[in-house]
Image (cartoon, rainbow, N blue to C red):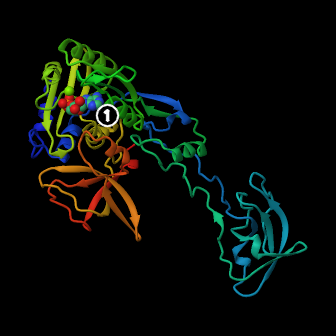
Amino acid sequence: MNGIMRAVSCIDGYDPDALRVDKALEAIRACLAPVTETETVAIRDSLGRVLAQEIVPRIDVPGHDNSAMDGYAVRGADLSASGDVFLKMTGSAFAGKLFTGEVRPGECVRVMTGAVMPQGADTVVVQEVCRAEGDRIAMPAGQKAGQNVRAAGEDLKAGVPVLRPGQPVRAADLGLFASLGIAEVRVKRRLRVAFFSTGDELASIGTPLAQGQVYDSNRYTLHGMLSGLGVEIIDMGVVRDDLRQLEAAFCAAAAKADAIITTGGVSVGEADFVKQLMAKLGEVLFWKIAMRPGRPMAFGRIACGDDAAFLFGLPGNPVAVMVTFHQLVRQALLALGGRTDDLDIPLLKAVSATAIRKVPGRTEYQRGVLFEHDGSWKVRTTGQQGSGVLRSMSEANCYIVLEHERGKVDAGETVSVQLMAALA
Ligand code: AMP
Ligand code: MG
């Protein structure tokens, strides 16, 4: 197995000891092998899944020209640019109830919204502007031929593809399937993601904290972040910094999952168990990424016998876990799950309300609060930005992304932000 090394070595400017975020993303992307298996599910169950087929309508939606308003269906040619025109009402049509006759010159038919346009009529005059005198209806001047009619196929056209394989199914798509009469769709099988925390200092919630211990919070933030991605989540608990236990955990994870996420044990000065073991089990790259927070990270593919899985070894610090997940792992998991649409998180512009310290040479992801002030978007940091201060993530509604080359920011300068809400 040396596919990973080969793939990344082709990347221009690849430097494992000072890896730019964009290069890390490029390196990861070059190595991924997406899920290929598919399954057929009822459309409700396809929400959040990755479509594995093209959707080509077999019917037009709507199936017929129909009225967009309550009013009268008329022949546009009968209308006048000046003065009222009187037309004789010869019947009515409702949504789901056809008018079977024809609208001839000088005639009109009462129509409700959604009613199929009667033959001969091409225009609807809304009821509010008309005046009825028995069965004679006065149409005011100034109506436009063709108005208030929805054309057959204006939403979906038979034979014209609407959804592509590799895109996620969203709420609107469920309705779209239903409007085409489609009951089941083919989707990629869910990506299986296993994760565990490493560290002798970690206690699980529900047990008392001994001196020097911290509760394991990373597994919970990971659970939360993975939940938004539509993957199958396999929580494997806390694993001690012990070679045998770690090896067993990696092999159990590789047997169950397509991807494994670990936290802790990749930083310099750690007891080197985790790194040693990762290196022993497969082809794993150890990176120092030019980003803050979140410098150390491992990426690769490990195998135990026939069971292989991609590996993302994240740092231990709670904020670094979230930032590396959001900026590097999220996209990778979505791509592994079969997504082929644009996975970049949009960068928006806002005015920094405060000065921000920053040195060129790394990308920083400061936690920010985006707010509106005097008609424009402003952003401030959440305060203390230490990578152990998880509260900064909790309070933030955005990341302030300070680009690699950028130096300090003065108050009033424009910065880029990413909305947390866009990260699911
Ligand atoms: P490490 O990367 O293992 O050196 O960990 C860096 C810091 O993050 C240390 O202060 C750890 O105690 C803390 N940490 C590591 N793993 C976790 C975890 N699962 N939950 C909370 N804090 C953690
Ligand atoms: Mg540790």
Kind of residue at disc 1:
Leu
Q: Is residue 335 left or right of residue 129?
A: left
- The foreground one among 207 and 298 is 207
- The image quadrant of residue 233 is top left
Give percent across and percent down for residue 414: 26, 65
Image quadrant assignment for residue 75: bottom right
For disc 1, the neighbor class at 10 Å (few under 14, some 14 to 19, many from 20) is: many
Report the image quarter containing ligand 2.
top left
Q: Nearer the viewer, residue 352 or 385?
A: 385
204 sits to left or right of 139: left
**Which residue matches tag 1?**
336
As drawn, is 187 to the left or to the right of 147? left
| Label 1 element class | helix
x%, y% of residue 337?
Answer: 35, 34
What residue appears at the point 70 percent right and 77 percent down from the top-left corner? Answer: 77
Quarter assignment of residue 80: bottom right
Residue nearer the viewer, 121 or 136? 136
**In the rendering, at what x and y percent does residue 239 appear?**
27, 19
